[in-house]
Amino acid sequence: MKKKIFKKNRAPRFLIILVFVFSLGLIFGWMSNSTELSELEIELENLNLDLRSFNEQLAFAEAFNLEACDSAFIERIGESIRQSSIILDQLEKDRRTTTPRYEFLKKKHNINQVIYYSELKRFKENCGYEKDIMLFFFDSSRPGQAEKQGKIIDSIAQGNGMLILPMDYGYTEYINYFYEYYPVEELPALVINYEHILEGFSEKEAILDALSR
């Protein structure tokens, strides 16, 4: 009498493992996203305090005819904005940018950038601060072009230490007045030291020329 050999069907077990691994990936992805958003939230709250403190410092100095030219403070705020921009950039590269929380924080970051940009202009005029500042307008729907332009800007910044404010142009209606002041038609675009505007992709030589004016 021949023994019947029954082969176990391994498909259900394989599917269970596959679903488990996929779910685990989603959970870790969500946790990572949540952690980075929390870091961004904390960074933005600290930045809000710095900006408010800086604004009050300037107002106090003007009211009592004092000098308020603490360049270390203004550069610390610039570094805080840079760190926030790095976190946002990483989230966008990882395609984790669809939550209402993220959108709110990005808008908040853009508003902070404009506040800093305005306060820095006043600081430069009152204190003779000479470090270059550049607005870097880009289109987040075209990440390749923005990244290429960003690398050129970073290579220049490493040499002269200029302050860079990267902004997803037209992202939030809360700063439409800002976009109206700089009505850019072709992205990426650069605004150098509040006056010189370069529209479209800019080579290193063109940027250096604008910086030297």
Image (cartoon, rainbow, N blue to C red):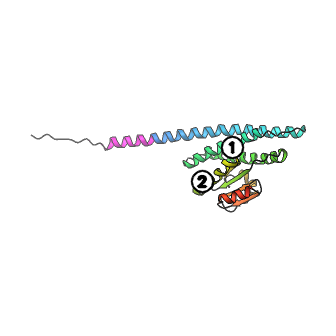
Residue 81 placement (x, y as % from top left): 68, 43
Q: Residue at x 74, y 38 (%)?
A: 50
Q: On residue 137, which mark appears?
A: none
Badge 2 vs badge 1, beta-carbon distance below 8 Å: no
Identify which residue, 191 or 24, lies in the foreground. Answer: 191
The magenta region covers 1-23
Q: Is residue 188 visible?
A: no
Q: Position of residue 18 (x, y in %)?
A: 39, 43
Q: Residues within 10 Å of mark 1 (few under 14, many from 20)?
A: many
Residue at image mark 2:
147
Is disc 2 surrounded by few (<14), some (14 to 19) or many (20+) residues within 10 Å? some
Image quadrant where one finds the N terminus: top left
**Looking at the image, can residue 90 be seen?**
yes
Q: Is residue 171 left or right of residue 72?
A: left
Q: Is residue 14 magenta?
A: yes
Residue type at the position of mark 1: Ile
Residue 81 image label: 1
Q: CA distance from mark 2 to mark 1?
A: 18 Å
Q: Nearer the viewer, residue 110 or 12?
A: 110
- Tell me the amino acid under the disc marked 2: Glu
* Mark 2 or mark 1: whose residue is earlier in sequence: 1
Q: In the rendering, at what x and y percent does residue 41 appear?
A: 64, 39
Picture coordinates of residue 33, whole percent (x, y): 56, 41
Location of residue 60 by image quarter: top right
Q: Quadrant of residue 17?
A: top left
Question: What number of labels is visible?
Answer: 2
- Say which of 117 and 22 sits in front: 117
Helix, strand or loop for disc 2: helix
Q: Quadrant of the C terminus?
A: bottom right
| Residue at screen point 84% across, 45% down | 126
Indicate the secondary structure of the residue bearing disc 1. helix
